[in-house]
Amino acid sequence: MLAYPKSLLSIEARVLLCTDERRGLPSLLFALKGAREPTSELDDFLTKTLARQVEAEEALHNGDLTPRMQMWSTQDPVTVFGAEKSVIGSEEVRRVFRWLATRFSDCTDYRFELVAVGASGDLAYTLGYERFAFPMDGGPVTPLTLRVTHVYRREDGEWKIVHRHADAPPTGQIPRADASTE
């Protein structure tokens, strides 16, 4: 597991959209990688899969379901313990995603702040905070922070999400986006 100082956690979608894999994440992040080769399994996961996931989450919060569906496995077991609903099974998960996409639109801000990540063999995970602002069900734009954990499984050479747990941090325990651990 890698844990990053909070000053590196604000990985915004526009940063992760960089096409150069070595510049897809803050350069300081690579200094923390120790003796690992620059093309390690974890590097590959971070620069390719996490970037796609951030794009998919931002799209979902704008009502576009397709990128998120492409990130998720269709091979059970697949689970969601969500902030809105919890479901088990690929078909149930997809049904919830379709429902969520109808409730979201016009996202004004989406950020994923990576707290920890690991990849080994055919399994990987991420832990972090999603921060976004959007009008739910046509209401006013509302900022929201969720703690999120994702579990990934490699299927036919591609990382697919097989589990998501998301909930609101306890009152008074929401870290500031610019907080430092130093």
Image (cartoon, helix red, strand yellow):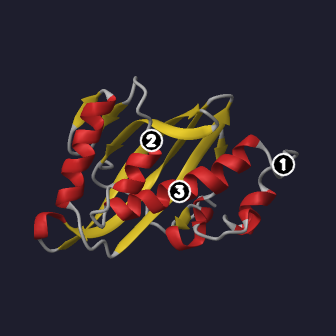
The three-letter code of the residue at mark 2 reads Thr
Q: Earlier in the sequence, mark 1 or mark 2?
A: 1
**Which of the 4 image quadrants contains residue 91?**
top left
Looking at the rendered structure, the kind of residue marked 3 is: Arg
| 66 relative to 180, above or below | above
**Residue toward you, 117 or 92:** 92
Query: What residue is shown at x 22% (from left), y 52% (from top)?
Result: 100
Binning the other alpha carbons within 10 Å of mark 2 as few (below 14), some (14 to 19) or many (20 upward) gives: some
The image shows residue 132 at horizontal and vertical percentages of 34, 66
Cα distance, mark 3 to mark 1?
25 Å
In the drawing, what numbered circle is on residue 52? 3
Judged from the image, the secondary structure of the residue bearing numbered disc 2 is strand
Looking at the rendered image, the quarter that the N terminus falls into is: top right
Q: Is residue 85 above or below residue 139?
A: above
Residue at the image point whose x is 31% and y is 27% from the top: 89
Please report the residue visible at 58 percent of the width from the left and 45 percent of the height from the top. Answer: 116
Looking at the image, is 110 positioned above or below residue 99? below
Q: Amino acid at mark 1?
A: Gly
Q: Which residue is mark 1?
A: 34
The reply, left or right, for residue 130 in relation to residue 20 is left
Residue 141 is drawn in which quadrant? Answer: bottom left
Q: Secondary structure at mark 1?
A: loop
Tag 3 secondary structure: helix
Observer-nearest residue: 43 or 32? 43
- Disc 1 crowd, CA 10 A, few/some/many (<14, 14-19, 20+): few
Q: How many marks?
A: 3
Mark 2 = which residue? 149
